[in-house]
Image (tube, rainbow, N blue to C red):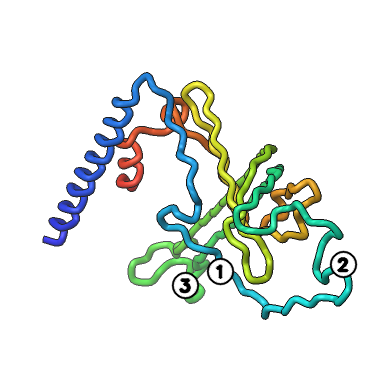
Amino acid sequence: MKMIPVVRRMVLASLALSLLSSCAAFDKLKNIGQPPALSAVDNPTARPGYKPVQMPMPAAQPASYNPNSLWRNGSRAFFKDQRAHQVGDILTVKVNITDKANIANETQRSRTSNEDSGIDNFFGKTKVPIINSAVPTRIFTADSTTTSDGKGSVTRQEALSTNVAGVVTQVLPNGNLVIEGRQEIRVNFEIRELIVAGVVRPEDIESDNTIDSSKIAQARIAYGGRGQISDIQQPRYGQQVMDVILPF
């Protein structure tokens, strides 16, 4: 009886997936012969699900000014600083990612055991009384052999080098900047997307208003694409469903 709700859920899920796949297929049929559309340029803070970044902040320090002085405490330059420092400012993020990892593990285990027990004589006699049969030299014999050999290796090498302009979307109470940058490039029928987001210190921004991706805290970097080639590289909806449902 308990299997009926499970089967019902599976049927409903299959119907929902069929509807979703049909909608996606309809969209693809509608756009046959057309390149994939670029995303509209919008305000990142106005997107559904956007949440301002909240991090532990120190107590605010009041600004101090020196009378009759052109220099203000905390300034990074004598003249006006052209680097990004407020919401809406633009800075360039230099994305340089070079990761390489080689991991190899091997474990071997082997064990051999022998159990042997027997009787040479029965109270000094070589035959068992009454039945008048020879005393068995071996009553119990057991052999056991266990061998285990496990190997594992991981080889990964990734490299990404590009630049993307980001916008300051928030200034935290301690002066750190929340940035987000999005870049889309369409070549024929394929769109390449690059997304960069995170928190940076104004002190890490270089004089040419650029910052290296290694200096971005809580960095979120995504590089991918969508289009005809990406669709071919993905398995079909039915295959993805079967990969989730089938236990083998």
How far across and how far down the image is residue 54, in percent?
56, 69
Question: Is residue 235 something one can see in this rendering?
Answer: yes
- Identify the element where label 3 is drawn: loop
Q: Nearer the viewer, mark 2 or mark 3?
A: 2
Which residue of the protein is positioned furthest toward the right in this rendering? 69
Which residue of the protein is positioned furthest toward the front in this rendering? 68
Q: Residue at x 64, y 43 (%)?
A: 165
Residue on which the image places disc 2:
70
* Residue 194, above or below 62: above
161, 202: nearer the viewer: 202
Q: CA distance from mark 2 to mark 3?
A: 113 Å
Q: Residue at x 79, y 51 (%)?
A: 206
Question: Is residue 157 something one can see in this rendering?
Answer: no
Quick check: 87 left or right of 125? right
142, 89: nearer the viewer: 89
- Identify the element where label 2 is drawn: loop
Q: CA distance from mark 1 to mark 2?
A: 35 Å
Q: Nearer the viewer, mark 1 or mark 2?
A: 2
**Given the image, on which type of amino acid does mark 2 rest?**
Leu
Name the image quarter holding residue 27: top left
Quick check: 79 left or right of 215? right
* Residue 65, above or below 231: below
Q: Residue at x 67, y 38 (%)?
A: 160
Q: Which mark is residue 122?
A: 3
Which quadrant, please, contains the N terminus?
bottom left
Q: Which label's residue is closer to the chain start, 1 or 3?
A: 1
How far across and how far down the image is residue 91, in percent?
68, 48
**Given the image, on which type of amino acid does mark 1 rest?**
Gln
**Given the image, on which type of amino acid does mark 3 rest?**
Phe
Residue on which the image places disc 1:
54
